[in-house]
Image (cartoon, rainbow, N blue to C red):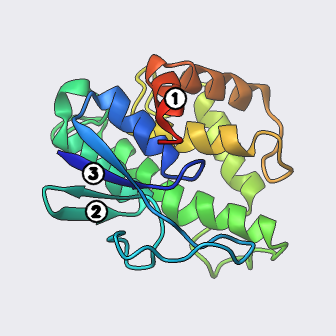
């Protein structure tokens, strides 16, 4: 049984979506987190080392950080087909997109949000616009990041773009809008949002 450590309307919400799409057995443990406005606190029930969400526990095996959780769950529940397994030719692209999300896209958004220019040649990430050019080029050739197959990486990217859709952090693109719509119109997403508040 998977336990998802969750705070409503946070990044852990997308893992309800993933768990629903995987048809995995799970339970939600709602925890408190520190908020930007100074409210909230680290919850002693949360196994994340910094009191953040998401984190999961699988019969005592703790996994945290979004790309790691996606990889763990899609490997753990392979029948869904939401993650290419070792030996599948799409596995390399899958792992690369998972790493790209955490190592390139998230830092790019943070840099833009903090209005801190990305120094060329030193960090492992690029400006948001450069990252989005690559993503848009990929989506101009296929419906999803792995081609015609929806996968765990689309849970990460689709929900992030959906969250930032009305924000100046995300460059406007009809391709991204259509991609978000394809990702979020899945029945598992509707079920997840109905459970988001616990």
Q: Which residue is mark 2?
A: 63
Graded by Cα atoms within 10 Å as few (under 14), some (14 to 19) or many (20 or more), the crowding at tag 1 reads few
Of marks 3 and 2, which one's residue comes earlier in the chain?
Answer: 3
- Cα gap from disc 1 to disc 3, whole angstroms: 18 Å
Relative depth, front residue between 152 and 44: 44
Within 10 Å of the Cα at label 2, are there few (<14), some (14-19), or many (20+) other Cα atoms? some
* Circle 3 residue: 3
Quadrant of the image occupied by residue 79: top left
Q: Helix, strand, or loop for circle 2?
A: strand
Label 3 SS: strand
Residue 140 appears in the figure: no
Residue at (45, 62) in percent of width and height: 31
Name the image quarter holding the N terminus. top left
Between the C-alphas of marks 1 and 2, the distance is: 24 Å
Q: On residue 194, which mark appears?
A: 1
C-beta proximity under 8 Å, tags 1 and 3: no
In percent of width and height, residue 26 lies at 26, 40
């Amino acid at each position: 049984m998977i336990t998802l450590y969750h705070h409503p309307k946070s990044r852990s919400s997308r893992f309800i979506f993933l768990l629903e799409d995987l048809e995995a057995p799970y339970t939600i443990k709602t925890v408190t987190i520190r908020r930007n406005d100074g409210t909230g606190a680290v919850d002693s029930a949360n196994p994340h080392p910094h009191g953040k969400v998401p984190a999961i526990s699988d019969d005592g095996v703790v996994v945290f950080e979004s790309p790691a959780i996606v990889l763990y769950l899609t490997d753990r529940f392979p029948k869904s087909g939401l993650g290419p397994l070792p030996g599948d030719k799409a596995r390399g692209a899958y792992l690369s997109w998972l790493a790209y999300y955490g190592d390139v896209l998230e830092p790019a958004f943070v840099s833009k949000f903090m209005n801190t220019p990305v120094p060329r040649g030193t960090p492992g990430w690029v400006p948001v616009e450069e990252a989005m050019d690559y993503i848009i080029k990929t989506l101009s050739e296929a419906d999803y990041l792995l081609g015609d197959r929806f996968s765990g990486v689309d849970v990460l990217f689709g929900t992030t773009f959906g969250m930032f859709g009305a924000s100046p952090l995300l460059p406007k693109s009809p391709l991204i809008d259509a991609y978000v719509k394809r990702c979020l119109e899945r029945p598992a997403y509707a079920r997840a949002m109905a459970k988001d508040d616990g």
